[in-house]
Image (tube, rainbow, N blue to C red):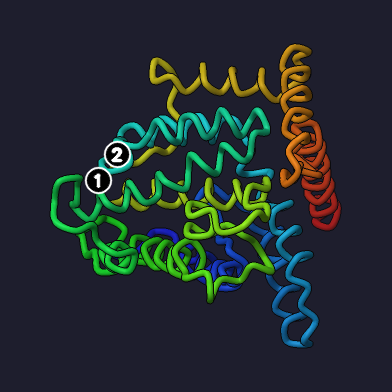
Amino acid sequence: MNDPMPQFIADFKEVSSILLEYGWFISPYMTGGEFEKIHDFCSKIRDSTSKGNVDKKAITENINLIMTDIIFQPSYRAFFVFRSKELPYIKEYSYFLERSILHYYKRDFLSCVLCLLPAIEGILLSYYGWSIGDERKPTYSQLIKKIEESKKMTELPERYDMYRSTLVEFLRKWIFIDTHGADFDISYLNRHYILHGMGKKCFYSANDCHRLILFFDLLIEYLSLEEKKYYIFIPDDPLGINIRREYYLTLIENDPNNKTMIKLEEEFMKENRNYETEKEPPKWADIQFRYMLETLEFYEKLERMRNQQK
């Protein structure tokens, strides 16, 4: 069966092939205007790369800025937690994802990463079919290969293959790569570096959180295709989505108690000599302002098109 959205397949492959070099890929949730922004930026990356002008840090910061507006949305995160509880393999570790999002909206990015990273390994072990008490735990290469060789029948095989390949490349090139081959110029978000305590560098920026959250967005889509669990719209309660969204909003908006708590906890953390504070945490007001500008630009564009047709 051919995919009903062949252009989506082509666009996803084109953009993700560029973004994966910087530890990113696009979100399955991205729509027209959102996608155009990242597509245009990928064209700039391609042009600068061809000219030998590559500033990895600047590129990753710009990718993060574009992707933040998608990842930070409370509705998407509430839906993310709901879906993690209904799918096989991942539902056994959904409490890691639940807690990670609470940490994320409290700007506790260190705890967010430390929830999500071990969840990856646990889910992959479950997908592999291994559990404690079995013979020797499979290697990271075996865990990745299990996904790579998965050939389950789905209603959207092209999309399934594409998601699978993206997940495999991200795991192989970034999360599980040997530290000798890791690109630490971009990030220290590496399983071995973090969980073996191999250094004191920051692996818990908002950027790092976003990359891990995005990985789970794609993993959830991948497992949804296997299980044939689809949603056209985000469903309403009593599934716990609305109440989570509202709670996330209380964490990110100007609640005085929450602001005091976050500020005080951050001051505690700063007393530790190797802790690095997040210089530019996501701000809901900035995201809303960018959305407002984009909406105005969209209507101005429509008005120009109408005037041209008169």
| Furthest residue in direction top, as rendered | 257
Numbered mark located on residue 249 in the image: none
- In the rendered structure, the answer to whether residue 116 lies left or right of residue 64 reads left
Which image quarter is the N terminus in? bottom left
Q: Distance of mark 2 from mark 1, alpha carbons?
A: 8 Å
- Front residue of 121 and 197: 197
Tell me where residue 90 appears, x and y as whole percent. Answer: 33, 41
Q: Are marks 2 and 1 in contact (CB under 8 Å)?
A: yes
Which corner quadrant of the image does residue 258 belong to? top right
Residue drawn at (77%, 47%), measured in percent from left and top?
A: 298
Residue 52 spot, x, y in % from top left: 77, 86
Q: Is residue 165 left or right of residue 55?
A: left
Element class at badge 1? helix
Residue 280, quarter of picture: top right
Question: Any mark on residue 87, and which?
Answer: 2
The residue shown at (66%, 51%) is 207
The residue pinned by badge 1 equals 227
Does dot 2 land on a helix, a strand or a loop? loop
Image height check: is 249 above or below 65? Answer: above
Determine the residue positioned at 62% across, 35% down.
73
Residue type of the residue flagged with mark 2: Leu
In the rendered view, tell whether residue 214 sits above or below residue 20: above
What kind of residue is marked 1?
Answer: Glu
Tell me residue 55's x, y (percent): 78, 73
